[in-house]
Amino acid sequence: TKGGGEHENDASLSSSLVKQLLFISSSTSSKEAKAKAPPSHLCAMTSQNQILVWDLNRGVLIHTIEPFLPKDGKRMTLHSIASSSSSSKEEEEEGGASLYALITRKDKVIMYEYSMEHGKLVRKIKSGSLEDDDDDDEDTMGKKATYLGVAVGTSSLTHNTIYAVRHADHIRLMDHVGNKLKKLSLSLDDDEEEEGDKRGHGANSGNTPVIVQFSHDGKLLIASYSSTSLVLFNVEKEKQCGIIQLSDTQHSDISTFIQNVDILLDTTTTTKMKSETDNDDDDDDEAYTVVLTSSNGIAQLYQTTLSTLKKKKKKKKKKQICATT
């Protein structure tokens, strides 16, 4: 809408599409407190390569961010925005939350960090390239760009910020200064890949929401492999620890896809598992509830742990859905 307040003359949102909405809490207290704190800002990424930031306490638009090249004023392509899932050392020291934007400049993938308070660029972090070999043309790189997504979390080991940037076939895991920690491969079992193809959702759909998300404790990372499947990673061990496929329901059809994901720490199940194993220090016993919201309005709940996948067998039991609402 046209809005009001300090930006009555800004009607840019009325002529563009909102591609992504993001609620941000500026709380710099504990991870648990930040997870429960009400959002202080709303950010919208538009089809006009803009990021609009509203102060929810005052109800006004406070920043309009437009990434561009300083030398010639040419805009770069904006693909995804993110904020930290919990407070890190950097946020506590700097006294405020940051907004992260994933951008491409020709074939280069760059993450821009902006101050939520001032709306100014803080720094740039390089995250690889769309061009894997010399044969990649512009059409191929353009297709690869549709898979780009970013998540920002807090390392459970160092309590520093950690970044995950999703590329076409892998996730680039980076530390708080932008150094690459690991290249995580995105893959499914043959049976699960075949099932996805039957429903019309292969690995290269590219036209549905790109999901990359850390749990609030920074131990679990979830990324979309296709429009109906997710790959789970144990961040500390830097290994894949599970796969979730969107289950068919009586309301599903071939166009149904994963719209949103929420990750909740299942403290009851975690306590039970630790008591059964008599090992309070085993982080692999951490249990999570993963909530998938699909495009047909149905939510599916799954339980998962950090236990890394064992050697694949020919017949592997699929992860079972535990609730549908």
Image (cartoon, grey):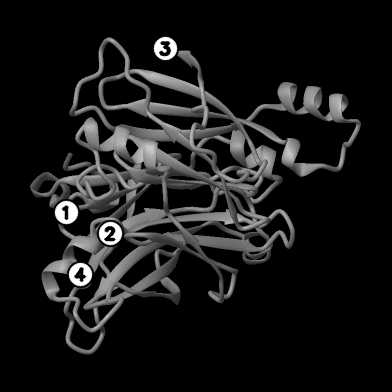
Q: Which mark is residue 79?
A: 2
CA gap, disc 3 to disc 2?
31 Å
Counting residues from the start of the chain, the first of labels 1 and 3 encountered is 1
CA gap, disc 1 to disc 3?
32 Å
- Amino acid type at circle 3 is Thr
Nearest-to-viewer mark from 4 and 1: 4
Depth order, front residue of 243/223:
243
How many residues crowd around disc 3 within 10 Å: few (fewer than 14), some, or many (20 or more)? few
CA gap, disc 2 to disc 1?
10 Å
In this rendering, the answer to whether 112 lies above or below 195 is below
How many residues crowd around disc 1 within 10 Å: few (fewer than 14), some, or many (20 or more)? some
Residue lying at 46% horizontally and 34% vertically, measured from the top left? 244
Q: Which residue is mark 3?
A: 325
Counting residues from the start of the chain, the first of labels 2 and 1 encountered is 1
* Place of residue 200 in the rendered image (x, y in percent of width and height, measured from the top left): 19, 35
Mark 3 falls on what kind of element? Answer: loop
- Amino acid type at circle 2 is His
For the N terminus, the image quarter is: top left
Nearest-to-viewer mark from 4 and 2: 4
Q: Which residue is mark 1?
A: 47
Residue most extreme to the front:
314
Q: Which residue is mark 4?
A: 141
Counting residues from the start of the chain, the first of labels 3 and 2 encountered is 2
Nearest-to-viewer mark from 2 and 1: 2
Q: Are marks 4 and 1 in contact (CB under 8 Å)?
A: no
Nearest-to-viewer mark from 1 and 3: 3
Residue lying at 16% horizontally and 43% vertically, measured from the top left? 2
Depth order, front residue of 49/221:
221
In this rendering, the answer to whether 286 lies above or below 7 is above
Mark 2 falls on what kind of element? Answer: strand
Nearest-to-viewer mark from 4 and 3: 4
